[in-house]
Image (tube, rainbow, N blue to C red):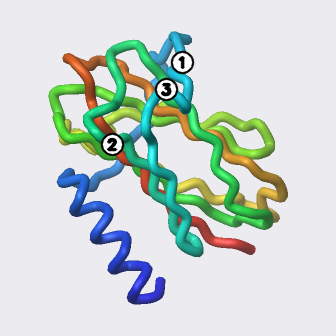
Amino acid sequence: MKTWKLFVLCIVVSMMAVSVVSAKEDSSMVPVKEVSPASQPININYIDNLISISASDGHGLKQGQTDTRKINIGKKVKSITIECDWGNPKNSLTLTIIAPDGKKYGPYSDSYDGKIDGCTGVKLTKKTGAWDATPWTIKVYGKKVSGTETFGVFGTWVVA
């Protein structure tokens, strides 16, 4: 990764002021009301092979809400890493990723590494070939939330 990309990623992550860890699959997510992307101010920024999606101005998810975003990152994607960070580790959010081919990955929850610290993430790698289409769908679900929880989603990808 180029130095300036790493620098930008560090700035974005530090602005969110959260920890970085892994996550695991959690099959306990149930269908719930989805929050329309237009109903909340969300910033989506693309810089080469880096994306950040952040809920801003105190807006975020309440318990039982799902925020769904579609991201267009091009074709021939060999691997993609997506991370979701939030401020209060007492709240629980999950991350689900739907690839362009329709395959669902997740939901991934905070407890994968045995730590409850307000962060979940996954790296997906296509074993043969590459994902040839776009968009990707990113869903963040408020599984257990007291009040409203703001969050940030960060991603990088590698093309074949």
Q: Is residue 92 above or below residue 82?
A: above
Say few, some or many: other residues with alpha carbon within 10 Å of mark 3 (under 14 / 14 to 19 / 20 or more): few
Badge number at residue 56: 2
**SS label for mark 3:** helix
Nearer the observer: mark 2 or 1; the answer is 2
Nearer the observer: mark 1 or 3; the answer is 3
**Which of the marked residues, 1 or 3, is nearer the chain's N terminus?**
1
Q: Nearer the viewer, residue 145 or 42?
A: 42
Say few, some or many: other residues with alpha carbon within 10 Å of mark 2 (under 14 / 14 to 19 / 20 or more): some
Badge number at residue 34: 1
Instruction: Identify the residue at horizontal 78%, vertical 66% (top origin).
Output: 76
Instruction: Identify the residue at horizontal 17%, vertical 35% (top origin).
Output: 88
Q: Quadrant of residue 24?
A: top left
Instruction: Specify the amino acid type for callout 3.
Output: Ser
Say few, some or many: other residues with alpha carbon within 10 Å of mark 1 (under 14 / 14 to 19 / 20 or more): some
**SS label for mark 1:** strand
Residue 79, position as x, y percentages in the image:
63, 63
The residue tagged 3 is 39
Q: Is residue 160 left or right of residue 39?
A: right
Q: Is residue 80 left or right of residue 134?
A: left
Instruction: Identify the residue at horizontal 37%, vertical 41% (top origin).
Output: 55
Instruction: Specify the amino acid type for callout 1.
Output: Glu
Q: Is residue 124 above or below residue 56?
A: below
Q: Is residue 52 visible?
A: yes
